[in-house]
Every structure is written in C-alpha cells, then in structure tokens.
Amino acid sequence: MSESLLIDRFGRAHDYLRISVTDQCNLRCVYCMPEEGMEFLSNDKVMSFDEIVAVVKAGAELGIRKLRITGGEPLVRKDIEVLIARLSAIPGIEDISLTTNGLLLERKADALHAAGLNRVNISLDTLDSSRFRMISRRGGLDQVLKGIEAASRVGFHPIKLNCVLLKGMNEDEIPDFLRMTLEHPLHVRFIEYMPIGHADDTWRSHYLPLQSVLDKAKELGYLVAKEERVKGNGPSEDFRIEGAVGTFGLIHPISDHFCKNCNRLRLTADGNLKPCLYWVDELNVRECASDPEALKAMFFRALDIKPENHEMAEKLWDAAQSHVPTDRRMSQIGG
Ligand code: SAM
Ligand code: SF4
C-alpha cells in the first residue's frame, strides 16, 4: 500500500476504514454490551447511506482501499446490500468485507454477494447451543451455522470465524475449534477479550491470554506451523495444523499488541471518525458530509490526533493513562 496520503505522526499509512452502520443488534453478547442500560441511537442520529458514501468517497481519494461493514449487527440495517453496492462502485475501493453474528446471513448471503461484498467474518464463540444462549443472551446457534453454510455456498472466500475466548466460559472449546480447521476450509480467529468501555470485574475475571491456544494445540499433539498471512488479516498471527484444510489465527491486542502496524480508522454509526478503538477521541464528520474538502480535512485531523498505541496491556490498571479511555461499548463503536 504505497499511494495512501493518510500517514500519521508515527509514519503509519492508512488504507482501511471500518464502518459501523448501526448500533442495534439482535444479540446481547456479554463481552460487548451490558445486560441493561444500553441506549440505542434514534434513527435521525444514524448516518444515512448518502452520508456514508460521501465519507468513503473522500477517504478513497486519500488512499482508503479496504472497507469493513460492521455494527452493532450490520445485517439488521435495512437494505444494507444497497449500501454495499454503492460503496463497491466508488473508485479506489478494492475490497469490502462484513463482520456479522450470522443470524440473518442465510437470508442475505445471495444479495450481499451480488452487491459486491467480497468476504465475511462470522462471530461464533461456542458450538454448544445452551452456551450460545448464555454468551449471546439470546439464541440462534443453528441459524448461525446455516449462515456459515450459506456464505460458503455463495462463494465468499476466505470465511473467517471470530471466536472471543472467555476464561471460564468457552476456553474448553479451543480443541473443538482447532479440530474444525482440520476438515473445513475456514479460518478460525481466536480473539482476546478486550476491555472496551468496561475495564471492570467482568473483564478481569474472563480475560484469557491467547498463548493458551498454542499451549492447547501442543498438548493435543498437533504440529503447528506459521502460515502466510490469510487475506485481509490485519493484526492476526496465523497458523496451520499440519495436514489441516483450514487455518487459525490469534488476535491478541492485550498480551501482544500490534499498534505499530495499525492501518485503520473507524466510522461510528453516528458519524464519528475514530482513530483508535480504545481511546475516547473522535471527530464528528456528519456536519461536513456535503463538503468533500472538509471531509478530507477531517481524515487528516483524525490522523493528527491518533495516539501511538492503546494501553490495554501496560497501563490498564493505572488510574493515569496517557489519554482517556472510551466509555462506549464495542457495539457502539463497531468492533
Ligand atoms: N454484530 C457483529 C458480530 O458480532 O460479528 C459485528 C459487530 S461486533 C461488535 C464485531 C466483533 O467484535 C465480533 O466478532 C465480536 O465478537 C467482537 N467483540 C465485541 N466485543 C468484544 C470485546 N469486548 N473484546 C473482543 N472482541 C469483541
Ligand atoms: Fe451484537 Fe456483535 Fe455485540 Fe454480539 S458482538 S452483541 S452480535 S454487536
């Protein structure tokens, strides 16, 4: 990625924008939202398709090449495929992916593929339906599995499964997820539980460093080799078990953070450009959505205020951090 003009104070070039299209969701995952007290955006606070397209056009002129559509649950946003078709027609945009909980994917897969979506990541933290109900505070594992099949049928490739590992909740399923890669052409991404908007006791008691995945693989007698980067895998460290059809990856922002290679900006559903997932800093771009030059200036301002790194690893426990951590939850930012 050579031609991006989006270079921050630390020399990092940015070509990737993650767009949250809604903060609404049909699940209530324990690590993402509190059980009660979430306030959702009213419709008039959510970016319109025209506004999102305007922001992406400005970004694409500066070097944004890859987009990820996320949320909340992006597939609950009405006519999401219409937005994807419009984004894929923007000159400069080369790759569009989507992160979904999979519940509506069986129904939407064909339309998403036809609209120009290239890839999907599907969240799947457990293969046990009662546990799925406990983690997501709703149900629907069968529907998610049908969504994965539909994604494969329409030809999305690679298909990645996002599995947030939670101590005492699903760590005993590491072997099942590893085994899944032996026979299926899937990329299973184990993700460390991050304290986004809630560095509290829930996080402290369920955080699990991902070294445990490699330890478990060794214990099971698997020979594991590092894998060439799987397409689109920014911060993931990738591996393959000898003889396996699929691969697995580790995303460990806390035990081994990856900020020095960060190439991404985020756009929240309410129109804030966010340089770092962890900190509070964001810039509202909605006000200037009709002015392409002002939008471009906002991209540069976002880079100017982008910190060198998050401090989830080293300073999380300190009262004094270098910036103020966000109090927004993952579903409100766009994970
Ligand atoms: N609803 C969609 C889904 O679940 O895939 C997209 C939005 S969700 C916020 C995006 C990703 O963030 C999911 O893979 C989810 O597991 C992950 N996530 C949410 N909260 C997290 C946390 N506290 N730590 C690590 N990952 C988290
Ligand atoms: Fe919804 Fe995704 Fe958050 Fe789960 S992780 S509550 S599916 S936004």
Image: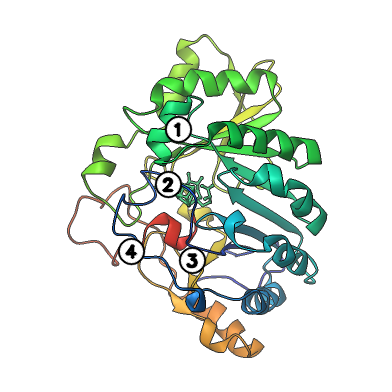
Secondary structure at badge 4 equals loop
Does label 1 or label 2 sit earlier along the sequence?
1
Identify residue for label 4.
326
Mark whose residue sits in front, 3 or 1 = 1
The picture places residue 223, in percent across and down from the top left corner, at 58, 14
Q: Quadrant of residue 202?
A: top left
Q: CA distance from mark 3 to mark 1?
A: 41 Å
Q: Identify which residue, 111 or 323, lies in the foreground.
A: 111
Would you call the spot at circle 3 few (<14 residues within 10 Å), some (14-19), or many (20 or more)? Answer: few
Horizontally, is 167 left or right of 231 in the view? left
Residue 277 against residue 305 in the figure, above or below:
above
Q: Position of residue 13 (x, y in %)?
A: 60, 65
Callouts 3 and 4 close, C-beta under 8 Å: no
- Disc 3: residue Cβ within 8 A of ligand 1's nearest atom: no
In what element is the residue under mark 3?
loop
Disc nearer the start of the sequence (4/1): 1
Per the image, the residue denoted by label 3 is 10
Q: Amino acid at mark 2?
A: His
Residues under labels 3 and 4: Cα distance? 22 Å
Residue assigned mark 2: 257
Sequence-wise, the earlier of marks 2 and 4 is: 2
Label 3 and label 2: CA atoms lie apart by 16 Å
Cα separation, mark 1 vs mark 2, equals: 28 Å
206 relative position to 10: left or right: left
Look at the numbered discs 2 and 4 and tell me whether their residues touch, using CB distance below 8 Å: no
Q: Residue at x 23, y 48 (%)?
A: 200
Closer to the observer: label 1 or label 2? 1
Callout 3, which amino acid? Phe
